[in-house]
Each structure stands twice: as C-alpha cells, then as structure tokens.
Amino acid sequence: MYFNDVHILYYVLFAVIGGFVAQIVDYCNKCFLKEQKILSKENFDKYKKTMLPNYLLIAVIAIGYILLLYKFGLQNNLNENLSLIKYIILLPMLACAFLVDLKEQIIPNRLNLLMFEIGLISVFLYGFDNINISLNMLLGMLAGGGIFLLITLLGGLIAGKEAMGMGDVKLMGALGLYFGLQNIIVISVLAFLIGAIASIIFMIVKKKNANTYIPFGPFIVISSIISIFIPFNVLFNILMEIFTLGMY
C-alpha cells in the first residue's frame, strides 16, 4: 500500500524513529532545565534509571514525522530530499525550544547555536543545486533576526524593558536559514497574531495583568510548524484576509 508514492512501511519506520527521537528530546529537555551537559554518560545514566516514556511527546513527534514524509515524499537523491531531512532534524529542536521556553522562559544558546549550524549546512548543500535558494535562506536569517532585534531595541527605548528576549531573536535568525525570506516574514506575523490571541485568552482565563511575562518562543515554534505544513500562498492569503478585514 502506498501513500503519496511512499510505501506504508516507510511511514511505520518514520513513526518508530519519531518515538525514539522524542525520548532523546525528553532527555535533552531535562538537561537544559537543570543546566547540565547533554553529552555526559553520568547524566544519561541518571536519566535511564528514572526514565518514563513521554507518550505525548512521542505521539507529537511521531505524527510530525509521518506528516513530513507524506508532504515531501522520498526522492532519488540528497538534494531532492533536503527539505525532508532539514525538517526532520528541525522538528525535535523546535520541540525542545517550545518546552524549555514554556517552563523556564529561556531558549538555551546551545540549542539556538545547533539550529544555526545545521541551518548553515543546509544552505551550503542547497547551493550546489540552486544558489538562489541559498541566498534566499541567508536573507531569511537576516530578516528573521533583524525584525525581532528591532522590536527588542524599540521595546527597550519605548517601554524601558525588553519587549523580546534575545533567545527569541537568535531563534528567528536561525529559523530564517530553514524557511527563507518570505516564509520567515509570514512566521513572524503569524507568531504575533497567535501570541496576541493567546495573551488575551490568558488574561481572561487566568486573570493575568498586562505586565505578566508570557514566553514568546512557543508562539514562534507553533507558527514555524504551521509554515512547514501549510503552503506560503495559503498562509499569506489567510493573514491578508484577517488584517484587511476581508477586503483583500
């Protein structure tokens, strides 16, 4: 049986790999939260002794891997599979950023650096096939980091405090290497829209005031995942309909 020209056994394999990766993400999250070394036998042995399957995380990443395989399929050479490969690597890192920022209101520098380094490798590999794609990814890095850095600086000048954490700025810069110029702009707008809606809901339900800090990283992650699976044109049209009140 085939789905999108890919045999069903490959979907099963990707789901199994996703479950295995999810437990690695769970281990990394615990190390990030305790500020411990990830590549440490001692820390890993401690984790194994108390390890419990994180079923929610396993389900999310396994389903994510299945959807990635369905969207991009399996091609005949490395360059044709680059989109699938880079998002398979990116998805668990996004999960880390989401969970750590949600709990500790910080995105670790070593996580952002890892995203950045892998992003640069993908840009380099894309360059062998089409240099314009690589240039677009580099512009995405500049735009993603630049937009959020500008917001942070303006927030500091106007409000006297950081409007955005530097971890978010670094995250957006790194993500620009994966999504390119147009998509990173859409991700930025979508993140602010989701963040605004979520903040209003939190204030109503939790009765938080306007000064309560709400981490922005999770909104960036959600917007990035949406952008992976929904085409740019569709997202752009939806956002234009929202911001022009249906007059677009």
Image (cartoon, grey):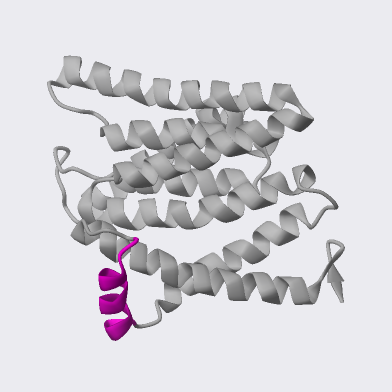
Is residue 131 one of those drawn in magenta?
no
Look at the magenta stretch and give its main secondary structure. helix
**In the displayed structure, does residue 175 sit left or right of residue 67?**
left
x%, y% of residue 88?
59, 55
Q: Nearer the viewer, residue 137 or 221?
A: 137
Quarter-of-image position of residue 129: top right
- Residue 221 visible in image: yes
Figure quadrant of the N terminus: bottom right
Where residue 7 sits, quadrant-wise, is: bottom right
Q: Position of residue 54 (x, y in %)?
A: 40, 76
Left or right: residue 35 versus residue 144 is left
Give the residue displayed 74% in from the left and 60% down from the top.
Answer: 70
Residue at figure coordinates x 65%, y 69% from the top left: 14
Residue 190 in view in this figure: no
In the image, 152 versus 96, the foreground residue is: 96
Range covered by the magenta-colored residues: 39-51
The image shows residue 109, relative to residue 18, as above or below, that is above
Q: Residue at x 18, y 16 (%)?
A: 158
Left/right placement of residue 241 relative to residue 189 reads right
Q: Residue furthest front?
A: 41
Pick the quarter of the image with the C terminus: top right
In the rendered structure, does residue 42 fall within the stretch colored magenta?
A: yes
Q: Is residue 88 above or below residue 147?
A: below
Residue 184 x, y percent position in the rendering: 53, 31
